[in-house]
Amino acid sequence: MPQGRPGAGIEGPPPVHIDLWIRAGEPLAGEMSPDGGQPTSFEGWLDLLDKLSELVASGVPDSADRRSQ
């Protein structure tokens, strides 16, 4: 079995660092930003997941979310 990082030989988009700050647990609220960019606020688990998926999709050139913009 080869040694090293899983997926090291797979080509794809560069990794994206996402900072996430949770300001309140009940109800869930906070901010997130990609690679130190402009923070985006979220309120609730569904909003967190929606905004997180948008940030991840924005780093993938062929994603359906980017093609629809």
Image (cartoon, rainbow, N blue to C red):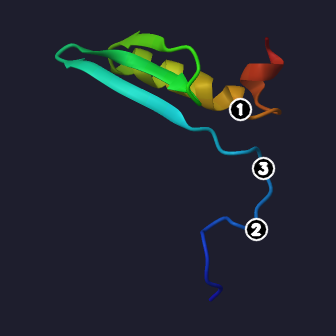
Q: Are marks 1 and 3 in contact (CB under 8 Å)?
A: no
Whether residue 66 is situated above or below residue 7 in the rendered picture:
above
Horizontal side of residue 19 vs 15, given as left or right: left
Q: Secondary structure at mark 1?
A: loop
Horizontal side of residue 50 vs 30, given as left or right: right
User: Badge 3, how many Cα within 10 Å: few under 14, some, many 20+?
Assistant: few
Whether residue 42 is situated above or below residue 9 in the rendered picture:
above
Quadrant of the image occupied by residue 7: bottom right
Q: CA separation, marks 3 and 2?
A: 10 Å
User: Residue 12 has which mark?
Assistant: 3
Q: CA separation, marks 1 and 2?
A: 19 Å
The three-letter code of the residue at mark 3 reads Gly
Q: CA separation, marks 1 and 3?
A: 10 Å
Q: Where does label 2 land, which residue? A: 9
Q: Where does label 1 land, which residue? A: 59
Residue occupying image coordinates x 76% and y 44%: 13
Residue occupying image coordinates x 60% and y 25%: 55
Whether residue 27 is situated above or below residue 10 in the rendered picture:
above
Quadrant of the image occupied by residue 56: top right
